Image: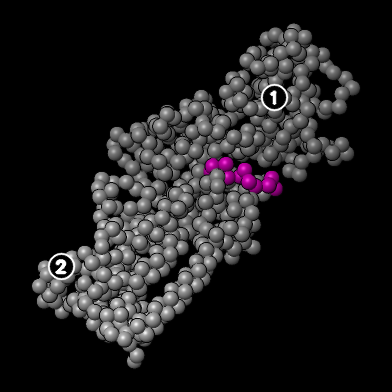
Amino acid sequence: MSIDVAFGHCYGAFGLEVAFEAQNTGITALFGPSGAGKTTVINALAGLIRPERGRIAVNGRVLFDSRAGTWVPAHARRAGYVFQDGRLFPHLNIEANLRFGWRRAAIALPENEVSRIVAMLGLQPLLGRKPSQLSGGERARAAVGRALLASPEFLLLDEPLAALDSGRKQDIFPYLERLRDERRMPIVYVSHSLDEVARLADTIVLLRAGRVLACGRLFDLLTDLRFGELAGSPYGTVLEAKVECHLVEDGLSLLAFAGGELAVAMLSRPKGSQVRMHIRAEDIILAKERPRAISANNVLPVTIVALHDSPSQYVDVRLGCGPTHFVARITRASCKRLELCDGQNAFAIIKSVTVTPAGSG
Amino acid sequence: MPAELQALLLSLKVAAVAVAAALPFAALTAAALANRSFPGKALIDGALHVPLALPPVVVGYLLLLLFGTRGPLGAWLLQHWGIRFVFSWTGAALASALITFPLQVRAIRGAIEAIDPGLTAAAATLGAGRVDRLVNLTLPLALPGLIAGAITAFAASLGEFGAIITFVSNIPGETRTLPLAIYAALQSPGGEAEAARLCVLSILLALLGLTLAEVANRRVRSFAGR
């Protein structure tokens, strides 16, 4: 499973110079503000634009190499591309839309797999309808289904889930994770939602103004203190944890991670299962002494590893808790009042934790 | 059969054959010209519109030079295939097809260029090659344009006069379409009554055509999901 991208391209005044590599890393998130060049990168992967120079390879198959003169046209690339705007064919009903790529696949997906995808996306009642009769969310689901039924070799998702309600996302995420794990299918996911990225991605490529600002594993990158500045959006800590036990009376579940335990609202997942936790930097409060009589369930003893002065009114603080690092964002005023400095001991009060099923990778 | 009915049926036949014969070529030409630029495109584009700009009599005369029994193409066709256009209704259809060809290309090309290029890109990522996309996506989506082009060309064919009379003459039952019949009636003494009847026929035909065009347009729009 690998994606290897290095190319340069010009759009009038907008120049794009992008290089990143994702080896054995499952879901790669292209993350950045609009206009950063995210869609251009996946269009180049899909073969919809031909970059001026560079090389693109997926799973070792060279799709484009300007030096060798290699160019695999879009229709021969087997990219499952889910477009942001769906792009269902207006003259075909949903069933014919879904079958469009399926019919043209080298090895057509077996019928039981087709019905499985149709059921997962809740498309059964829509099959006879025209795209114009569908709501935004329904269209997005149909577009995901159409790409999956084409049995692609890699998936390109351009913010396809933006139009979906959260319940449906919960159904689709595990399926994407299964594709990655079972079929070893590289997935490139374009998003500007950090929550989605934190939940799904294994590798993050941070883009801004046509350049790669950072590229790396999610866990490393999200606690990188420069990230908040680079990404220009709320960030925080993502870590893997195990369900330690359920405290039924209190309605809590204890999650163990390297360095400690956190209590969260009771989960429906069995004891011992792996989960992923996302803690926003804004959701951590710092105290110099252990607070008493406090409503938050989680107070962790931590050591201040680094302070990062951002240009805004905030200070980002990297906190060590055993081998695990957290990031907290506090105001410059609080930092001054508490006289925080490196190496100090403190307590992190964690207001809220988002828990999602773990991805591997 | 009364002469009026004969002229009407002949007009319909000539126009229908002209449109049907030109349509596939017009569709391919439109697809080749739409959304693409290549060296010489402007020249081809200009050449396509020449029949529209020329006086139809000139088109008819050029056809006569080319397809006359002693013309370069006409002699060859007659000798090898036994096909003769001059003084035949097929010649009338050929002249009509040539003159209305640019109308069809324009209508179809406009419809193709109105298609969201994103849809074509989506079809490509789903494994559809160029011809596949043309047949299964572009042409079906351009169907309103194809039908509009065909209807315009059909109406223009019904009214064609100069090219037909120059190329294939005015032979009752063979090349005398409605406009030619009206002309012939007006040329003969006491033919005003017949000319008037033919004119009424023409007007009715036009109204019927417009109604059918509207019905077809609605059907097509619902087909394309718009």
Residue B50, by quadrant, is bottom left
* Residue A281, disc: 1
Outermost residue toward the front in this view: B189
A321 or B60, nearer to the observer: B60
Q: Position of residue A304 (x, y in %)?
A: 69, 14
* Residue depicted at x 79% and y 16%: A287
Q: Position of residue A95 (x, y in %)?
A: 55, 62
Q: Position of residue B97 (x, y in %)?
A: 29, 68
The residue beneath circle 2 is B66
Mark pair 2, 1: CA separation: 83 Å
* Residue B27 appears in the rendering: no
* Residue A291, disc: none
A98 or A265, nearer to the observer: A98
Q: Chain of mark 2?
A: B
B175 or B110, nearer to the observer: B175
* Residue depicted at x 47% and y 76%: B208
Q: Which residues are magenta?
A: A157-167
* Residue depicted at x 55% and y 31%: A32
Q: Chain of mark 1?
A: A
Q: How many marks?
A: 2
* Residue depicted at x 32% and y 46%: B37
Q: Position of residue A22 (x, y in %)?
A: 48, 33
In the image, taking residue A262 as reference, residue B217 lies left or right, namely left
